[in-house]
Amino acid sequence: AIRDMERAGIDIITDGEMRRESYSNRFAVALDGVDVDNPAIVTSRNGKPTAVPRVVGAIRRREPVEKRDMQFLRANTDRLTKITLPGPFTLSMQAHDE
């Protein structure tokens, strides 16, 4: 993905997020206070039951979440880089607050 973006002339490179299980889950599983092993079932916007992480305590970040991926990205390109992260609103819409 990095080489494809470089060849296409893209100025700011990302890693294509290929190592992520999902955009939001990678971040959610790195937080204390979030139970991903015993999900809640909520109704999604399209009316289907969906398993989501449960917020069961104070939210705290244990360690940098995307540091390893950013190190990989920077080691493999000399261009500007970026890593995308879900924000609080996105995470709150994809979790059940208990």
Image: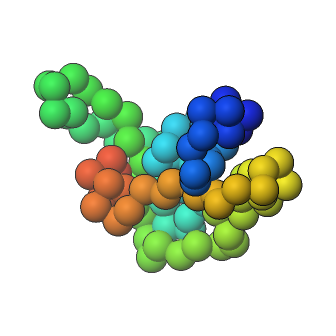
| Whether residue 60 is situated above or below residue 46 in the rendered picture | below
Out of 54 and 60, give the one closest to the viewer: 60
* Rendered residue at 35%/65% (across/down): 88
Residue name at image x 26 percent, y 51 percent: 93
| Image coords of residue 54 (percent x, y) | 40, 53
Q: Position of residue 4 (x, y in %)?
A: 67, 30
Left or right of 95: which side holds 43? left
Towards the viewer: 69 or 82:
82
The answer to whether one can see residue 86 in this image is yes
Residue 68 visible: no
x then y, percent, for residue 79: 70, 56
Q: How is the image coloured?
A: rainbow
Q: Position of residue 2 (x, y in %)?
A: 70, 38
Quadrant location, the C terminus: bottom left
State the residue at coordinates (32%, 54%): 90
Q: How many marks?
A: 0
In the figure, is residue 47 to the left or right of 50? left
Q: Quadrant of the N terminus?
A: top right
Closer to us: 98 or 82: 82
Identify which residue is drawn at 36% across, 56% down.
91
